[in-house]
Structure formats: C-alpha cells, structure tokens
Image (spheres, helix red, strand yellow):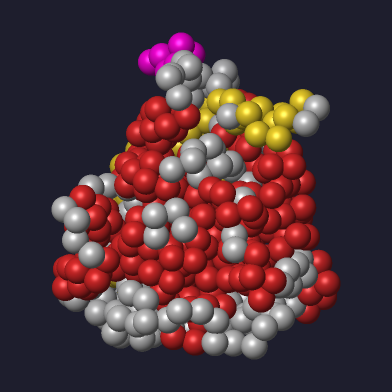
Amino acid sequence: MTLSYEKYLDKVKACFIGKNIGGTLGGPYEWAREMLDVKGFTTPPGKPLPNDDLDLQLVWLHALEQVGPYAIDANLLGEFWLNYIHPYWNEYGIGKANMQRGFAPPVSGELDNDWKHSNGAWIRTEVWACTAPATPETAVYFAIEDAKVDHGAGEGTVAAAFVATLQSAAFALSDIKDCIALGLTSVPPSSRVAKSVQIVLDAHAKGKCWQEAREEVRLANMDIGNGYFEAPSNIAYAVIGMLYGEGDFKKSVLTALNCGDDTDCTAATVGATLGILYGTAGIPRDWAEYIGDEIVTVSLAKGDVGNWFPKSCTEMASRIAEVMPTVMRVHNAYFLYKGNDAITTVFGKEKLSGAFEQLQSRIQARVLPLTAALTPYTLTKTEGPFSLSLSLSDVRIAPEKEITLSLTVALRVAFENRQYPLSIRFILPNGFDVTGAQSVLVKRDEASTDGKHGLGRVTVPFTLRAGTTVGREERVILELTVPGRHTAIYLPFLLTKM
C-alpha cells in the first residue's frame, strides 16, 4: 500500500469524527428493542455526546505513548483499566472486579461473566486499526489482548477481531464489501459472530430488505447470554448498515441505528469504518459541523493524566500518527515515510495480485489462528527471552480435584538463535502437589517457516492436584529460571473454590 501521510492522517481523523457522529445519533436510543425510524440528530448542535466507545481508546493511546506497543498485553491493559476507567457497567464491572480479586486476563473476562458475549470490546477497536493500517494481524493481536480483559474467550472477543480486521483493511481497500469479507475470514466459521454476519450477507444477496435481514438475525440469537445487548446480533446490525447503506454515509449510519438494540455502538462503528474508507470527504459536511471536532468523555478517571488525553479528533489523529510506525514494527510490518508517500510492506510474503489478495493471505495465515486459539483460561506473559502461555483446564477447585496444565514456552524474535535450558518450579499452597517435567530445553525449531528457521517453542504438560482442604481462593506461582543466567520469570495464577 502506498498512501500519502496527509491521506492517512485524513482517514484517521475521519474515523473518529465518524465515531462521534454515530455515537451522538445513536446515543438517545440505546437499548431500544424495536426497529426505529430515526432520520437525524435529536441532540443540540455544536458538541458530540460523550461515549465510552471512544473514551476507552484515549486510555489505550495513553498506554501506547507511555509504555510502547512491545509491552502491551492483556495484563498491562488490565492495569490501565483499574487506574483510568471508572464505570462498573456489565462486563466492565465483572472484568474489573475479577482483577481486583486477583484473576488475570482472560480469566478476569471469563469467570462468572454473563456479559462475555456482549458489545464492550468491538466498539473500541479503532485505535488498534488506525495504528496498524492495512496490517490486520497487528490490529487483531492488540484487539484480542484488549478484549480478553472483560470478555475472556467469549463472542465479544471474536467480534473485536472481526471489526479490527475490517477497519484495518479499510485503509487499503475501496469497497466496504471487501472489508466485510476479510473480517469474516478472520474469525472461526463456527462462531456466532460469523454465523450472524453470514445471515446478513445471504439476505442481502437474495434481495431481502434490511428489515428482513435484521429480523432473521434477532431470531437467530435470542438464546445468547442475556438475550439482548450481545455482540453477534449487534455486529450483524452494523454490517446491515454497511451493506444496505450502499456507500452513502448517512444512509449507512441510520440503517444500522434503526436496527435498534445497542444503537450508539452500531452507528458509531459504521461511522468510524466509513470514515477510514472514504476520509473526511465522505462525511457529510452538515453532520460534521453539527457535532464539531471535540471529544467529550464520560467514563474516565482522569486524575493527574487528564490533560494528556486528546481533546479533539484532530489531536487524536495526530498523536495516533506519531505512534503508528512503532506499532507496525511489532509484527515486522513497516510504514515508512518517503517524501509525501508512506509505504507499507510486510516481510516474508510474496507479492500477490492486489491488496485484497495480500490481506486475505495474511489473515488466513496470521489472524485466524489467533481467533481460533482463544480459550477461557490461557494466561500469557512476555518477559526476557521468552513468551509464555499457560493453559488451565479450569480455575475452580475442590478438595483433591485435579487440574491439567499445559505450558508453552517460545523464544522471542531477538533471541531465536539461542538455546535455553529452563528449570521449572511451582510454588504451591499447603497440601497441593504437581506432577510434570522440572526442566526443559528450548531451542530453535528445525522446521522452516517462510524460508527461515522457526522460533524455538516447546510445550510441557502438568497435573495439579488440590489438597484435602482448600481455601476460598488459592494462589499458585509458576517459576522459570535459566541456570547460569539472571533470567527469572514468575507467572502467578489464582484458583477459586467451587
């Protein structure tokens, strides 16, 4: 993709103006259970409505600026949640309460969470897409880490991957249908998100009206979670707006809104996505002038950092553009300024016939594995030379109950040519015991990947057995050390009594 800096900046600005427009239009009708007939703004002109869909992304931008993308994962974003985001609504509250109990993501978003299939994560993907233009593998990585905090491995996390994919792709493509197709490629076909989007695609192909498509989606998802405010249907309502809007910004946003349910989220996501696709020229001037450029917040505990948050869409776009090149390099993607042009490329992939084919190839190879691998109780940590993944069969314990563990240790890119003997130790509560290997050698894979040796990776199974008595909550600590080196990594996890 070759994109001028000015055009990139314009698309990012349009993204957040579109977000504000949709959120302001849809805000007064949130939670409507019926189809609507909204034709325009009902709020006073001159200022957008505050919306948590945008609020949380100011915090994620702050994280990118303060600690950088290499350090960001679900655990770190959880810390930013607890410091800067004050609501305890639905999944927000459950995720925060679980972290305050000591449960790390994704357990924080999974345990006792009736809202894990809801909308809180896919509504805040724009910052990830805009810092990873035309690089969905990077956008989705961050979107999933973000979503795991309050949605675990639920449909809410799958939905975030879908939206992050199509929004990142919108920087390189010109047809919203292609963006939707790529979004669908990025999530498991068995997911309710994929099935709901497919209902809309089929209805549209058969010439059915948007109202018929909306009703088919609603009926298909009545059994999910609380039966409303859930991600599969609302993602589908946003897709209805994008498809049936036929490229017209007003028609697209209003069609999504008029499907009802989580109207500020669906309309805001459609507005943001079309903003990326068409830039500010695609946003009707009267609507842009009606809400202005300001960002108004509602859910941030600003404290000492309040003045650091962007105050306008223009400022938001400028600051995203500053961090974007560093974010791109997280997955070996490059966004290089060359005069007035910016050139995006990715290592290790042959040139295909066009942007759609190149994005599709990377999504199938790099994005779909991320969404397909989502599990409720898989803890991750990146430290020193290693990336760790510890999967638990359960986090609920009872006296003498056994839990199976699977530890995967992978070498990070900068250390791929080294071999590391690891010592493994579990620090256990009284009466608990664990069986499994006490040491393992991590070395470079012999298999070839893209013409290069793969990263070192090893997986080790364990069985953890509880004692004859267990407390309400019990903490276990996994310790990894490298003999002869200062490397020491600790991965704690909490178990709760059934």
- Look at the image and tell me whether residue 22 can be seen: yes
Q: Which residues are magenta?
A: 447-453
Depth check: 393 or 435 in front? Answer: 393
Q: Is residue 468 left or right of residue 415?
A: left
Q: Position of residue 273 (x, y in %)?
A: 51, 55
Q: Looking at the rendering, which quadrant does residue 300 occupy?
A: bottom right
Q: Residue at x 62, y 81 (%)?
A: 49
Q: Is residue 13 above or below residue 20?
A: above
Q: Is residue 353 left or right of residue 34?
A: right
Q: Residue at x 63, y 62 (%)?
A: 16
> Which quadrant: the C terminus?
bottom left
- Look at the image and tell me whether residue 195 can be seen: no
The extreme top residue here reads 451
Residue 451 is one of the magenta-drawn residues: yes
Depth check: 10 or 455 in front? Answer: 10
Q: How many marks?
A: 0
Q: Looking at the rendering, which quadrant does residue 284 occupy?
A: bottom right
Q: Position of residue 127 (x, y in %)?
A: 60, 55
Q: Looking at the rendering, which quadrant does residue 36 occupy?
A: bottom left
Q: Is residue 301 above or below residue 409?
A: below
Residue 75 is one of the magenta-drawn residues: no
Q: Is residue 410 above or below residue 348?
A: below
Q: Residue at x 39, y 60 (%)?
A: 245
Q: Position of residue 487 (x, y in %)?
A: 64, 38
> Which quadrant: the N terminus?
top right
Q: Residue at x 37, y 46 (%)?
A: 177
Q: Position of residue 228 (x, y in %)?
A: 29, 79
